[in-house]
Image: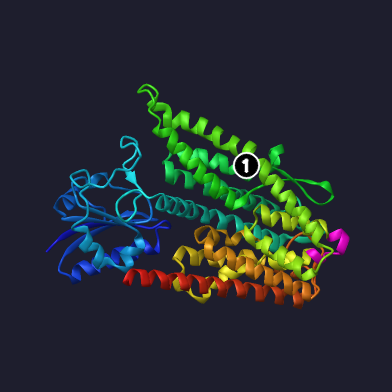
Amino acid sequence: MKKYVGITACPTGIAHTYMAAEKLEETAKETGNQIKVETQGSIGVENELTADDIREADAVVVAADTEVDLSRFDGKRVLVTGVQDGISRPAELLEQALTAPTRGGAGAAEPSDEPAAETGTTSASKDGKESVGHTLYTALMAGVSHMIPFVVCGGIMIALALGIGGKPTAGGVAVPEDSFWQTILQVGTLAFSLMIPILAGFIAQAIADRPGLVVGMVSGFIANSGAQFPYLTTTGPGGTKTGLNTGFIGAIVIGFIAGYVAKWMRKIPWHEYVKPIVPILIVPIFGTAIVSLLYVYVLGRPLAALFNGLTHFLASMTTSSITVLAIIIGLMVSFDMGGPVNKVAFLFAGGMIAVDQGKVMGLAAAAIPVAPLGMGLATLIDRRLFTKQERDAGIAALFMGLFGITEGAIPFAAADPARVIPSNMVGGAVAAVLAGMFGVHDVVMHGGPIVGVLGACKPLLGFFTAILIGALVTAFMSLALKRITARKKDRAVTA
């Protein structure tokens, strides 16, 4: 009989963490062995391993997609792999662990390039060596899992304020000043505004540990505050200047940059008298300055030029086929869900209201809710393909979609961009094309079913039909792509 200890952890800390632990325990029991598995979930560490547990163990199995402290396993055979492997092939992991490299001894895996004195954690791939791809994945998942509560909290509060206290105006759906619902709207907007800095900050922290948090959060906030910087402005219809906010895509890029800048700064051979202030003074100040200035002065100009070009391109399309314009508007609105590409299409459509009585805005209004509604429907149609946290986020996304809050789909897109973003774009394009065919007009700068309910969008039947069909296209396409990926993984495991 062999004795094992293990650790399981997933980015959200809900479903996969405990599923992997259960599979490892069941497999060990079936094969006449013993294993104690420590779970590092969203509610904290449970079934914590003691020094005696580790000393008596023949091998260690770490099935985790987050950073895990491996320093306590020095002298033990340690197999490090992903949490999905703990679910799909537990017997193989237990067998491989008995011949895995010994940590800190002969045949040990190469150590992480993080200084041991600063952190005992490592992000490892299946062979025990740090993998850039694995690090990027776990960092992204860490950012997404911390971001979701802000999306849900802010999005639902905004939706409630608009839905109950909102009234249609020429500039969109507005909530009366000094009303109770205006206060709720402001609180929700504040919570929502933290989404991007949180995403960037925790991506950076997952790469560089705590010194990376402030670099990522401040840089992420700047990436979402383009109106404050002259180099980050785009020119809309009529020559109006608009701040360029790069949304969740910008947050991901900035988070990775911030994380690796902070990590690089920590690895500099600082003088022993300087080392104590590196994580609390040098990295936060100089790291933040480097990344923020890089974004404002280096990335800012080409980004602004790109989105100015997109605006002028859309303007040139108004004299072409309405179907072609609808496809482009639908794709852009659904691409980054509130990010710069979305905003270019939205502001262009809004600027055209006075010219075409809301014809182009009707295309955008139909596409705007498709991503959150589609992904919300997907979580209801096949719940097995989503984690518990994603299923909960799906309910919130449905609610936000009804009120035209495209950002409700961001958690799904950030976690699985290769399948979710194309599905969103195709569904959005279908909705916009149908809106054009049905002659939908929207006279306010807002989208989603809420504008139809408030009487700002006509014809209602055509508008709602376009939204429903677009959302269903997104839902079924995303599910189909996820199933294909799941089958490929299953074949790879059994091969």
Residue 160 in the image: state x and y as whole percent. Answer: 65, 61
- Residue range highlighted in magenta: 353-360
Q: Is residue 218 above or below residue 462?
A: above
- Label 1, on which residue? 299
Examine the rendering and report whether any part of residue 37 can be seen: yes
Q: Is residue 354 magenta?
A: yes
Give the residue displayed 62% in from the left and 51% down from the top: 247
Does residue 441 appear left or right of residue 306 in this picture? right
The quadrant the C terminus occupies is: bottom left
Examine the rendering and report whether any part of residue 39 can be seen: no
Q: Secondary structure at mark 1?
A: helix
Residue 189 in the image: state x and y as whole percent. Answer: 64, 51
Does residue 377 appear left or right of residue 233 in this picture? left
Q: Main secondary structure of the magenta part?
A: helix
Residue 237 in the image: state x and y as whole percent. Answer: 82, 52
Residue 23 in the image: state x and y as whole percent. Answer: 28, 68
Q: Is residue 207 above or below residue 311?
A: above
Give the residue displayed 37% in from the left and 23% down from the top: 271
Label 1: few (<14), some (14–19) or many (≥20) C-alpha neighbours in 10 Å: some
Give the residue displayed 65% in from the left and 43% down from the top: 225
